[in-house]
Amino acid sequence: MANVLEIKKLRKTYPGFMLKDISFSLPEGYVMGLIGPNGAGKTSIIKLIMNLIHSDGGEISIFGMHHGKDSVAIKERIGFVYDNPSWYTHLTLKQIKNLIAPFYRSWDESRFQELITTFGLPLKKRLSTFSRGMVMKSAIAIALSHHADFIVMDEPTSGLDPVFRRELLDLFYEILQSEKKSILFSTHITSDLEKIADFITFILEGTLIFTDTKDNVTENYAIIKGGLSLVDNLTEGLFKGMRKTAFGFEALTDNVKEVKKRYGRDVVVDSASLEDIMYFSKLRSSDDTAH
Amino acid sequence: MKIIISNSSPDPIYEQVGKQIKAQVLSGELKEGDALPSIRALAKELQISVITTKRAYDELIKEGFVDSVGGKGCFIAMQNKELLKEKRMKTIEEKLGVAVNDAQKLGIPLGDLKEMLDLLYREESE
């Protein structure tokens, strides 16, 4: 299976922030969610993929091509939704579209009109009058109007209501009926788009925590709850991030089988949502810095 | 075909899909040669990931419930009735094994256990 995206040892240093040797890949025809709390480095990774900023090391290839040298050919086939579209707000959506459409050879005007109608967007109002949700919808409509093979979205659901997020999900499933289309999105709100994701890549403070199929993640990770008397005897390394209360503890594990084997009925095993994983991993990393 | 996914079930989603398709084969609702929806169509309908759906189908193929015909999709395989029965007996045996194990831990004698089984069996057939 060919990879639509391949990232090897990607590095980027900013004052006070560093992306550390990030490597992951996405096979063609699948969906990846790039998750992590604010400031984890998700947007930097997406900007590097889109060749909007330069890396300090590592390689990125898209459709098997070099992301810098073949940038023009690659972007023709990418539909890109940026977290905070920096469009001229005194223009109307129609004017913005007229600016962007000529860059794409495969621009499909009827598809665009269809999406605008579905999304209920006004073509002739200035963008300055748009809500954040409407701006996101506009960006998504534009990104989906040139039959892109790879859709890359930075926080596409921020500012969108739950009803529209569900509709968006249907739209993405529609696109995925073709085995040639792939999607990468970043998010810190994991509940909706999580359904469609085949792979989850988790970034925390510039470091890759894991990249795996969502099924493996949900199978291996769990929230373990138990009495405080257990806390001192817990095996090191089996638990990541722990929250203690007056009545017991809650901790994250990435090896639920081993926990069940060792502690059996002394603990309660709850499935861990991606939000749980983010929360408890973050707890641990702030513990580390405290020591 | 009927498939219902529960997000609160402890079973992984691919297993839920697989189990329900198998149950429908065993009950005869799905018959030999019946076409299954494509992986991507089923993922869309159930709002689950493509990989999860693929895994469910792969397991069904491995267990001999489904045949994959290149380029045409997946179909319910010819079922060996004897083999099916044997498989189901084995599941029942396993479940009884768990019950026996629990009973032994609690020191419940075989006679009492048999009585329980008798009672349950009659209740269910009523």
Image: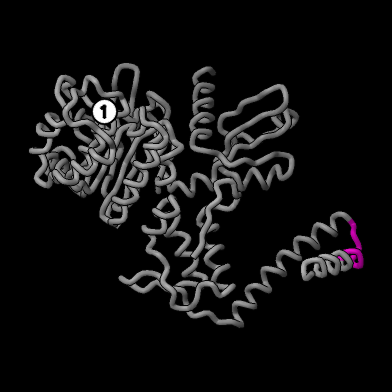
Q: Position of residue A11 (x, y in %)?
A: 29, 31
Identify the secondary structure beneath mark 1: helix
Residue depicted at 68% across the width and 74% down the height? B89
Could you say which is closer to the camera, residue A184 or residue A144?
A: A144
Provide the chain ID for the residue under circle 1.
A
Residue depicted at 26% across the width and 28% down the height? A135
Could you say which is closer to the camera, residue B124 or residue A77?
A: B124
Horizontally, residue A96 falls left or right of residue B95, namely left
Q: Which residues are magenta?
A: B107-113
Q: Residues within 10 Å of mark 1 (few under 14, many from 20)?
A: many
Asked whether residue B112 is drawn in magenta, I would say yes
Q: Quadrant of the C terminus of chain A?
A: top right
Residue A234 seen from this side:
yes
Q: Is residue A228 above or below residue A291?
A: below
Q: Quadrant of the N terminus of chain A?
A: bottom left
Q: Is residue A43 above or below residue B36?
A: above
Residue bearing mark 1: A135
Horizontally, residue B118 falls left or right of residue A20, namely right
Could you say which is closer to the camera, residue B109 or residue B79?
A: B79
Residue depicted at 17% across the width and 45% down the height? A146
Q: Position of residue A17 (x, y in %)?
A: 34, 21
Residue depicted at 83% across the width and 67% down the height? B117
